[in-house]
Amino acid sequence: MTGAGAVSAIAEVRDRNGVWRGGSGVSDLATGAPVRTDGRFRAGSITKVFTATTVLQLVGEGRIGLDDPVERHLPGTVPDGVHITVRQLLNHTSGLWDPTNEKGGLFPDPTDPAAVRNWLDQGGLTRTITPAQVVAASVAHTPAFPPGTSWGYSNVNYTLLGMIIERVTGHGYAQEITARLLRPLGLTGTYFPGTATDIRGPHAHGYLTLVEGPGPADRSDRDVTVQSVSWANSAGELVSTLRDLNRFEQALTGGRLLPPALMKEMTTTVPIVVDGQPAGLSYGLGLARWQLSCGVAYGHDGGVAGYSSQLWNSGDRQVAMSVTPRGDETQLQAQAVAGYGSLEQAFCGTR
C-alpha cells in the first residue's frame, strides 16, 4: 500500500500459530519517523461493531426488541419512526438519508477541492457536530427509499442506535460501551474521543491531498490528524489499536459477548448492491460478510479523513489493518485495491 502511495500501513494477523505484526511507511511526513505498529489510529466505522454488540446485549436483556419501532424509544425523533425498526437501523435498510456522506450534507463536496480547502481554512475540520444535528440534517431530506425495501449505508442509523442506548440505559453510549466491552476486555488503547480533537499517545498522522490543478505544484497534503469526529459519534468516532481490535473481534466471534442466537442474528445478512451489481459483500447487524476466494470472513471497514481501517475474522485467522492514505482519486483507488489484495492474501495465502 505504501508502494501505491500511502503514507503508512500497519497490520496485525492472529491465528493458531501466534501473532504477526508489521508496518511500512512513516508516521509523520514532516519528521519521517517510521510508523509504529503499536500506535493508535482513528478506526472509523469499525465503531459500528461495538455499537451493534452493545445494542444486541440490550436485546438479550429484554430492554430492546430488534423489531421495536424507533418511535418506541425515540418518540418524535424520526418522522417515519413508527415504520423503521431497530433491526433496520442495524442492517442499514431504514432508508434514512446520510448527511455525512452524501452531497448537500454536512460536509463540502470532496470532488470540489476549492470548497474543501475553504472548509479546512475556516476550521471546519475541528467543529463539533452533535448527534442531534446529524439526525436533524438527515430527516430534513427525503429518505433514500421506504424502510425495509432496499439497502443503503447511512451513518445516521448508528447515530440513532447510540441515542437509543442512552435512552434505554440512562448512560451515554460511550460510557455504556466502555463499561460493557472496553473495560472487561482490557482494551486499554481504545477510547471514545468525544469532542476532543487530538489522538492520545503514539499515532500516525493522517493527511488529505488537495488536487487543485494538473501540475505537481497544484497538489498539497494537509495534515488532518487534529480533527473532530463528533459527527461520527456512535457510528465512527472510536480511536483504537491493532491489538485491541483483534482482541475485541476474537471475543465477539468466539461467543464471549453474545449468545449463539444473537450471533446468528448478527451474521444474518442482506446483499450489498452497488450500481446494480453485487458487491461481493453482504451486511448483517453491524457485521459485514465478505466472500473470499477461500471462504468467508466477517468484519467491518472504517474511514474518516486521513485514516482507513479494516477488521476481519475468518474463524481461524484475524486481520486488523490501519492505513493513512495519500494522493488523488486514482492513487487512493490503487491503495484501496492493494489493501483488499493484502487482506485476501492474509486470509487465503500460505497457512
Image (tube, grey):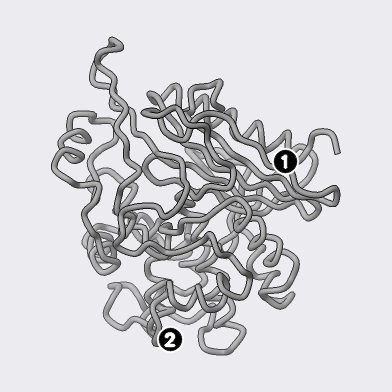
Quarter of the rendering occupied by the C terminus: top right
Q: Which amino acid does label 1 sit on?
A: Leu
Q: Which residue is drawn at 66% across and 33% down?
A: 342
Identify the element where label 2 is drawn.
helix
Q: Is residue 287 above or below residue 107?
A: below
Q: In the drawing, what numbered circle is on residue 168?
A: 2
Q: Residue at x 36, y 58 (%)?
A: 232
Residue 139 drawn at (x, y percent): 26, 64
Label 1: how many Cα within 10 Å (few below 14, some 14–19, many 20+): some
Identify the element where label 1 is drawn.
strand
Residue in the foreground of this view, choosing between 27 and 6: 27
Residue 3 drawn at (x, y percent): 56, 21
Classify residue 122 as left or right of residue 2.
left
Q: Is residue 268 above or below residue 44?
A: below
Q: Which residue is drawn at 45% across and 22% down?
A: 331
Q: Which amino acid does label 2 sit on?
A: Val
Q: Is residue 240 above or below residue 3?
A: below
Classify residue 343 as left or right of residue 286.
right
* Quadrant in the rendering for residue 280: top right
Mark 1 highlights which residue?
Answer: 292
Q: Residue at x 47, y 47 (%)?
A: 202
